[in-house]
Image (cartoon, grey):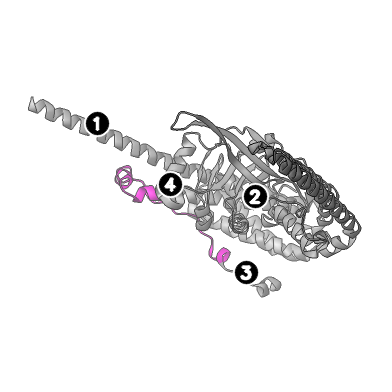
Amino acid sequence: MSSPTQALRELEPILRDIEHQRTQEVTAFAQVALWSVIAGGLMSILLASFNLGIWALLPLSIGLLIILVTYLSKAHHWRETFKWRVMNRLVKHFNPNLEYYPTQYIPQSEFRLSLLFHNAPEPDRYRGEDLIMGVVGKTDIRLSELQVEYKREYTNSKGNRHSEWVTIFRGLFISADFHKHFHGITLVLPDTEESWLGGFGRWLQSLSAKIGNQPGELVKMEDPEFERLFKVFSTDQIEARYILTPSMMQRIVEFRKKTNAPIRLSFIASRVFVAIPTYHDYFEPPSLFAPANKLLEPATIAAYFEELEFALAVVEELNLNTRIWAKR
Amino acid sequence: MELFTGLVCVGVGALGLAILYALLYNSLIGKKNQVEYAYSGVDVQLKKRHDLIPNLVATVKQYMQHERALLERITELRSRALSPNLPENERMQIEGALSAALRNLMIAVENYPQLRANENFLHLQASLNEIEEQIAAARRAYNAAVTDYNNAIEMFPTNLVAATMGLRRRPVFEAEEHERATPSVSQLFQQ
């Protein structure tokens, strides 16, 4: 692993090159924009003298449309260039054992297997990007950004049918090898009932496990801070405690504080799945119109390193590299 | 007619009470069995540890000439824990002492680099760590079950039913005095 400054030094030729490309693209875009406005505007003024009313604005509108399309294609191209040429290498600098695939993501089968959102409706739209995978220390890890939605259809008071996309999950999804063997299923979900309904909320949770809404049964943990933030369901009471040792519970509480989001964890088939909901879009280039040489600033590169650190923090935070048990 | 209505009321009331009693009775039996089940979980792990110890002692004996006393103590504690008809609390005390002795052994191992290079020993050490982790988990599961059971016995209205069934509070596992004390580094060096 090299530092951001080292990475910057080694990547400088590439960064200069794509910075040059970006300036060219921006100049090209500016020319297109200028000519579209001038040509469209002049024709509109000309047409206005023929008393065509609103139609006189048509050429100007076409001009604006051309600007929009050009911008979108340039921005897309810039993003692709950045991800394939810069982010790719930054990931390698961050940790040589990691691979980066900008357009790939965690497959839906794995998302389903994690059971983290098993009570949500079946997703109708499943998208993602920025797959990072590899081995950190002794831990095999895969993560990507995901956006999972379902389509909700409803009829409003006037009898019109509407539909809207409802987000099931948006954020970072991580799948990592856990450092202990286990056979059952253990879910750690944000506690929404007990925090304001107290004992009654806990009773509701145990009921929801009994009627098959959750796998196994409710597991009551002894760490009060952990219990306040999470509810645990497991098919095996002892195994749940084997996984969630007192120190592991503290680590999860710390990780929850650090991410500052209602994280979910599941422990299935000797792997841990973590969903961190976030609206931040990770591993994206600076804007196409960013100030000159923004990419060459140490702060920009350091920010990408921070994003990578955050995404991969689960290995350190959950101590996944400690292998002193039967699983080596 | 009035007598009939009265009888029906009493009958319905009695039936309601009987059903309530049955429900509470069953929930208490469920909790009691949960405690026993959790206890057997601890038992299974302790047995695994007993099975591991002879192998472990045999492996380290040839390397650790200066720890004979400790090894003998471990072997002795193991055979005492295995003796039949041991009262529950005495058995738990012996197991606690055994845990402490094994921990001391693992600290003493640090002085024997040859041992730490032995593949067989490393495997046994990982197994022991695994079992200790499982014992800790099983104990916590047991404590959770006992707390649930004790709450039911002392809380209204289950306490009334529990009294008729003769159910008593059960003790939870507590960390032994020496387990709770913070280890002092100077003491560790003197060993």
Return the residue at label 3. Answer: B183
Looking at the rendered structure, the kind of residue marked 1 is Leu
Mark 2 nearby-residue class (10 Å; few <14, some 14–19, many ≥20):
many
Which of discs 4 and 1 lies nearer the camera? The answer is 4
The answer to whether one can see residue A3 in this image is no
> Which amino acid lies under the numbered mark 3 shown in the image of this protein?
Pro
Q: Residue at x 70, y 64 (%)?
A: B107
Real-space CA distance between mark 4 and mark 1, rounded to the nearest whole angstrom: 30 Å
Q: Which residue is mark 1?
A: B15
Q: Is residue B181 magenta?
A: no
Q: State how many labels appear.
A: 4
* Stretch in magenta: B151-180
**Disc 1 to disc 3, C-alpha distance:** 60 Å
Query: Which residue is the site of mark 4?
Result: A201
On the image, numbered disc 2 is attached to which residue? B131
Which numbered disc flags the more N-terminal residue, 1 or 3? Answer: 1
